[in-house]
Structures are given as structure tokens and as C-alpha cells.
Image (cartoon, rainbow, N blue to C red):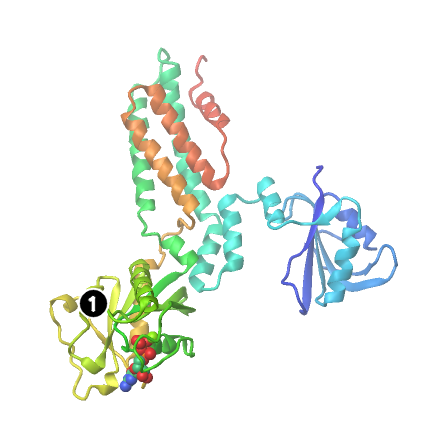
Amino acid sequence: MSADTIFALASAPGRAGIAVVRISGDKTGKALSRLGCKTPPPRRATRVKLIDPITKELLDDALVIWFPAPRSFTGEDVAELHLHGGRAVVDGVMAALAAIGGVRPAEAGEFTRRAFEHDKLDLTQAEALADLVDAESRAQLRQALKQMGGSLKELTDDWRHRLVQALAHLEAVVDFPDEDLPPDVADKVWGEVRDLEGAIGGFLDDGGRGERIREGLSIAIVGPPNAGKSSLLNALVKREAAIVSAKPGTTRDIIEVHMDIGGFAVSLADTAGLREAGDDIEQEGIRRARARAENADIRLALFDGATYPTRDATTQTLVDANTIAVINKADLLDQQREVELDGADAMRPTHFISTKTGFGMPALLQRIEAMIKARFDMTASAAITRARHRKALEECREALSRSQIAKLPELAAEDLRLAARSLGRITGRVDVEEILDVVFREFCIGK
Ligand SMILES: Nc1nc2c(ncn2[C@@H]2O[C@H](COP(=O)(O)OP(=O)(O)O)[C@@H](O)[C@H]2O)c(=O)[nH]1
Ligand SMILES: [Mg+2]
């Protein structure tokens, strides 16, 4: 092993009860002994006094855990120093480590990269690790843990294994036509390719759920001026994020807040009221409002209860299956608020709320949550969580469908090889040699 030994503060910077410094590489043992710490028993928290190698001053009374290679996160010798989380303590230990020859501060992601290089995890698990650290909602957490546990890796590995098998059989037909191969080999190959194409196609057709959960869902509030859009945003996030005013055209740019609804990370946008009037700036705000509304996962179309039952026609045109129609200022409506179920609304009941009194707010939140769950709840164990996965799977599916209409078996085999390579890119393992291995192991050609 010639790579440098690296170290970094693994816990968040700043004052804390405990700070963890992680060291990885073949000079880890040497670094520990330079700090006055004899190699401790493996994988056991051991109390040590860390000494500055130059000044001989006490740096900290700490805990060290020693993970000798290969049973460590990176696959290299690793030590974790659990220090008292003070700035001076951490700085002192880091400076002492940096002064040791062949030991240097780690670059971003370098520990995980080494873990990947030593086959401790594949690319999807490395990505999941990053997602886990970034997770802010339950759904993101759950998804990251599943992927880190190998859900996506296992699925793509399984597809790739089957594909390599089919390819091996096809190559046997191409390369050794005179051998005594079972007569139905080609049929089996194409049956398998069709199955794989179907499975991957089905997996791709997921409405982008995994990616949406990872990035956060978007909800836009749209409606005419003065309907109470800004008030609704404030009521949902329970703080005064947007300016509320009786003056129409107050909200011009998009105001965005982040919140958690039912365990999902959501970004909620308040937009400029839709109307013809207003200056250039307001018109630009309205243009943005429409664009945001179109791109949102879920829309809240807010109507002004002061004009009920008349509804703003422009806003009404935006109501579709992903929209919840809401009528605000229910406090102004005197009689029983029976919902008039006209044709369009029969499928999508209108919610009456009052941001002023809080009337109908819990029911609205429940409705939003139900809509999110219906569209984004993951029951399947594996999910596409990044554009990178989707692109590779799409390339794979295209190659699979090309292979079935290829004019020559050699060309079909090349397409299957490309398809396998696309799958291999997802996990970061691309290896064509194994195809040959399968041919010879399975067929004993040439006896
Ligand atoms: N009576 C009543 N007035 C409301 C309610 N919600 C908002 N308003 C008032 O409606 C006006 C416009 O509110 P705002 O949130 O700025 O509307 P926006 O233009 O759609 O963002 C303000 O004067 C609010 O105080 C409500 O539930 N009931
Ligand atoms: Mg507003």
C-alpha cells in the first residue's frame, strides 16, 4: 500500500461533548505510537493519554478504537480517536497528526472512496452514505438506509448477472456453432432478454419517486391576488415567512420555505397572485408563479372566499389531479359550507379553510399528506435515487431492445455487452472478463 495515510475530523466542527478524528492508511499504527499510544486491542474502546510528539505535552485523555485492516470502514488500518470536543483539543491532535511524515488531512469523500476501492461498498452504497448524512426527513432516511443496505446494488447485480449469463450463452452459439449445444439455447437467451427489458422498464416507470424523495418534493400555492396565499404559507410553516397584506400584488417573487409533511421533505412556494394588472415586475412574478406551479409535484389552488361561490377562472384552469382546490376565508361565509360538486370538482373535493381562525387547516394538512403518500410512498425495496442511475438503466433498456432486432448475432451480442456495461456503471463494477469465465465454466467447450 503506497497511498498516504489520511486523517480528518469525522464529527461536526465546533464545540461539542465529543469530537471524533478518524485516521486511515498503513501509517495509522505509527501515528498512534507517535501520539504515545501503544497499539490497542482491535475494535475495543481503549482509554489513552495522547501526547504531543514534539513538545511532549498532554493533548487529551481520550478513547481510541483500533480497526486493523481489512476489517475497517475503508479496508485499511483505521483508528478513531474520541476526543473531548473542544477546539484546542481537536486542533492540537490534528496538528500533531499532520506533522507525521506520510500522514496528511483527507480530501472530501476520501475515506468513502477508499472504502469503494477496497470493495467495502459499491457506488450506490457510497451515494446512500452521502444521502444518509444529508437526510432531513424520515422518508429520506429510510430510503438512504435501504440503499446503503444494498437494495439497489442487489437488484442491479442480479439483473447484470442474468444478462451476463444470457450473453455468455449467446456468445457460445456465435463462437462455437458446431459444438453440441442444447438446441433451445437461443430461445432461452431471448426469453431472458425480454424478461430483463420488462423488469427494467417497470423499474424505470416509477414516477421519479426515489429522486423526488431525495431532493425533496415541491408544493406551490397559486391563486388570485388577496386570496390569502401568503397567509396560508405562514399558517403551514407556523411562522411569518411571507408578507401578508390587504394590498393586492404584495408578493412578487417566489418565497420558498422548507418543511416536513408526514415525514417527507417538502419545499413550499408562495407565489405572486395571478392577474393581468400590475407593473413589469409583478408580471414577471406572475410568469414565475405559473412556471413554478407547472413544475410543482403538488399544487394548492387557493380561491378567495370573499367572492365565493365565484372562483377565479385563471386559477381554475390550473386545477388537475395533482392539485388540491382550497377556498380560504371560510370565516366570512355565513351559512353551512356545503361543497357544490360541479363536474370537475366531484373527483376532487374542495377544502374550506380560514388561515385567520385555523378552521380546516388540520384537514388540509391531512389531505396534502395523503396525496404525498399516495404518490411517493415507497413500498418497493429498491429505488432509483439519482439521475445517474436512471440514465444507466435507460441505456441498458435501449441496448436490450436493440439487441432483439439486430441483424447478426454478433451485433446482438455487442448490444447485450453494452447493456451489461450500463448496469455495471450503476454499482461501479465493470468487468468484461467474467463473461468469458461464464462461457467456459458453463459449457466445457472443447472438452
Ligand atoms: N377574513 C379573512 N381574511 C384573511 C384570511 N386569510 C388572509 N386574509 C386577509 O387577506 C388579505 C390578503 O392576504 P395575503 O396572505 O397577503 O394574500 P395573497 O395576496 O394571496 O398572498 C390580508 O389582508 C389577510 O389578512 C382569512 O382566513 N380570513
Ligand atoms: Mg402574497
**Would you identify the image quadrant in which residue 139 lies?**
bottom left
**Residue in view at x 36 percent, y 27 percent:** 415
**Residue in view at x 42 percent, y 69 percent:** 259
User: Does residue 255 show up?
Assistant: yes
Q: In the image, is the residue at mark 1 within 8 Å of ligand 1 by its beta carbon? A: no
Q: Nearer the viewer, residue 146 or 268?
A: 268
Residue at the extreme left:
343
Q: Quadrant of the N terminus?
A: top right
Picture layout, residue 203 above or below residue 433: below
**Type of amino acid under label 1:** Thr
**Would you identify the image quadrant in which residue 287 lies?**
bottom left
Image check: 394 left or right of 121? left
Residue at the extreme right:
55
Q: Nearer the viewer, residue 135 or 332?
A: 332
Measured as percent of width and height from the top left, residue 320 is found at 21, 62
The residue that mark 1 highlights is 314
Image check: 93 left or right of 207? right
Residue at the extreme front:
279
Measured as percent of width and height from the top left, residue 383 is found at 39, 50
**Residue in view at x 28 percent, y 80 percent:** 360
**Residue in view at x 48 percent, y 41 percent:** 427
Picture layout, residue 428 above or below residue 238: above
Picture layout, residue 242 above or below residue 378: below
State ligand 2's quadrant. Answer: bottom left
Image check: 358 left or right of 385? left
Measured as percent of width and height from the top left, residue 99 is found at 80, 51
Measured as percent of width and height from the top left, residue 288 is found at 33, 62
Residue at the extreme top:
178
Q: Secondary structure at mark 1?
A: helix
**Would you identify the image quadrant in which residue 324 lies?**
bottom left
